[in-house]
């Protein structure tokens, strides 16, 4: 997984990172409009660049306690040519990533349903899970979003 910069964000006091190439924009929190019968992890939709942007609550998707933070942000990422907003507790920083700081995901984690965790970044005394935004949604989940 050779990338040079990553956006680090927090979910429930744990750190995660996304390759900066997958990030389109970072927005302040905007209260989404709820959509009836949407998947449990979809917080709603917002207007974004004259389009509708579904907002995925990563705490819900990752089965973490919802942490309505005053620092909540929406990370807009491209997913198969469609944008989606990832609701996170806070965006920490953009960091430089060196190849030797990344370890593959331990087998115990990769066999679990965390197929979207693409590796572990060891930065100083921190352990940061690297997320592949292309794998966060299954094909079925992604196709259900296209109706929003």
Image: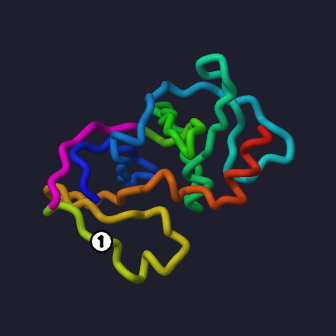
Q: Is residue 23 left or right of residue 56?
A: left
Q: Eyeballing the image, is 51 above or below 96?
A: above
Q: Is residue 117 left or right of residue 126?
A: right
Q: Residue at x 59, y 62 (%)?
A: 63
Q: Is residue 107 left or right of residue 66?
A: left
* Residue 9 spot, x, y in % from top left: 38, 44
What residue would you read off at disc 1? 104
Q: Eyeballing the image, is 51 above or below 94?
A: above
Instruction: State which region is magenta.
Output: 91-99
Most foreground residue, 29 or 137: 137
Q: Assign a secondary structure to mark 1.
A: loop
Q: Eyeballing the image, is 11 above or below 101?
A: above
Q: Residue at x 70, y 32 (%)?
A: 45
Q: Residue at x 59, y 50 (%)?
A: 66
Classify residue 61 by image quadrant: bottom right
Most foreground residue, 3 or 88: 3
Classify residue 122 by image quadrant: bottom left
Residue 120 covered by magenta stretch = no
* Residue 26 spot, x, y in % from top left: 44, 29
Q: Is residue 43 left or right of residue 87?
A: right
Most foreground residue, 60 or 83: 83
Most foreground residue, 40 or 20: 20
């Amino acid at each position: 997984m050779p990338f040079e910069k990553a956006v680090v964000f927090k979910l429930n006091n744990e750190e995660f990172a996304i390759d900066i190439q997958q990030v389109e924009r970072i927005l302040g929190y905007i209260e989404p409009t709820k959509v009836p019968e949407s998947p449990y992890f979809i917080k709603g939709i917002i207007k974004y660049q004259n389009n509708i942007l579904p907002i995925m609550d990563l705490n819900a998707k990752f089965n973490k306690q919802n942490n309505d933070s005053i620092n909540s942000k929406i990370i807009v990422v491209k997913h198969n040519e469609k944008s989606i907003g990832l609701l996170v507790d806070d965006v920490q920083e953009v960091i430089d990533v060196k190849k030797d700081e990344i370890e593959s995901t331990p087998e115990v984690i990769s066999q679990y349903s965390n197929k979207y965790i693409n590796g572990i970044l060891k930065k100083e005394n921190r352990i940061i899970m690297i997320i592949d935004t292309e794998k966060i949604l299954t094909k079925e989940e992604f196709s259900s979003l296209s109706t929003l």
